[in-house]
Image (cartoon, rainbow, N blue to C red):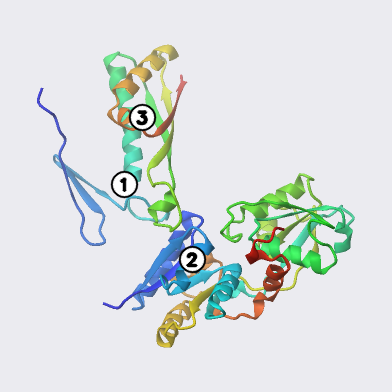
Amino acid sequence: MDKVSWNLRIVAEEKEPATVYVRKHQFRVGVPLQFDPEYQHITALEYALGALSADVVGGLQAVSRRRRLKLYCIEAVVSGELNNPLTYLGVVGETGNPGLEHVNMTVYVSSTAKEEDIREIWGEMLQKSPLVQTLKPTVKLDFVLKVTA
Amino acid sequence: MTKPVIVGTVLYDPKVAVIWGIISDFFNENGFPIDMVFYSNYDLMVDALLKRNIDIAWNSPLSWLDSQMRSGGRCRAIAMRDTDRDRESYLVVKADSGFKKVSDLRGKSVAVGASDSPQATLIPLSYLQNHGLIPGKDVHVKRFDILVGKHGDHTGGELEAFYSLSRGEVVACAMIDLNWQRWTQDGTINPNEYKILATTDKFDHCVFTVRQDFPADLEKRWLEVLFSMSYDNPKHREMMDMEGLKQWLPGRTSGFGPLGDAVKTFHFFKGGEI
């Protein structure tokens, strides 16, 4: 099989957030990370956490459809911690790195299906998730699945 | 392009960088570009000031003394917040403890902050010593060394000292007046359950510091911009609230006496143990 690749183009102009062009779409990304809650753009780190969560939620939907399992609603709450955010700011004397070290995610699934069936597709989704499989070797991923009727 | 003046500060929490970002933008907008350099501890920042890696240091009171000591008195205090002047530290006890005077603490345990906290350790312990209670001999000292090197900026040790009092492990704890005000307002401390047993002499806190040879014209222009911040301007007020001031004032050195005495008493810069 030929290698399959995904191609994006990203452009940043002075003081403006970067614009990502992908297929026929585009979106804007702010600075890598930001500590000001009033910052006006979505940061690269927030997009990364959002992408990981969307991968999990969307993956769960996709697998459930294949298994003809009805999931009414899926919601994920995610938080990420860096190894040492002060290194991103270049604080002299700090050690470590600004990489993601730990991601906590709680996924709420509303369904009348049996919980054991949902847990089975949860396991399958994790195996097939591109981003979970990418991050798993280097980032501590604590995911919790909560099923409600 | 004008060469930016380089300002150093110690950063213990990334959120503090937001404040310095606003200050930096303010200087840039006023035609006086500054670059910020962050340090993990005051020792490194004083090194940088004296090695000319930075032009201005946002010193803690302890690092001000350190700068002066290491430079042989060749540093100048040029600006400080209004809230840096005339601070006090309190020795706080339980309201029903029956303690009425400092000497009642003889033979008891007192909780303090980090070993290098001027407000929560050095000045209060020096106060006890000046009132006849030698720390470690006449009073047992329980110290909370959280983030040593940041000179008590991080209030974690000070807060742990209070929690130690609330748990009954000690009979008194030390804290700066600003934290007493904050914690009695936000519910951390119930002011009906605790009281101030003693108040230290007034002292000054942080101060912008330059080397003696920092060019006078640069200093004058830099201070003009700094002092032009106005609490009446909503754009400035946000930062000033975050940094805890209503006005920038000229630096002064008359308020470092109590800490200077404490440093001598405990041989702090010679590795003395409290």
For the residues marked 1 and 2, what is the alpha-carbon distance in whole angstroms? 31 Å
| Label 1 vs label 2, nearer the camera | 2
Pointer 1 indicates a residue of which chain? A
Q: Determine which quarter of the picture holds residue A135.
A: top left
In the foreground, B125 or A129:
B125
Q: Residue at x 21, y 50 (%)?
A: A19
Q: Do we see residue B254 in this rendering?
A: yes
In the foreground, B117 or A103:
B117
Q: Which residue is mark 1?
A: A44
SS for callout 2: helix
The tag on residue B76 is none
State which quarter of the image contains the N terminus of chain B: bottom left
Amino acid type, callout 3:
Lys
Q: Which residue is mark 2?
A: B45
The tag on residue A136 is 3
Amino acid type, callout 2:
Met
Please rate how many residues cluster around mark 1, counting C-alpha atoms within 10 Å: few if below 14, some from 14 to 19, many from 20. Answer: some
Please count the marks in the image.
3
Pointer 2 indicates a residue of which chain? B
Q: Residue furthest left?
A: A2
Residue B219 percent across, percent down from the top left: 44, 83
SS for callout 3: loop
Residue A130 percent across, percent down from the top left: 27, 28
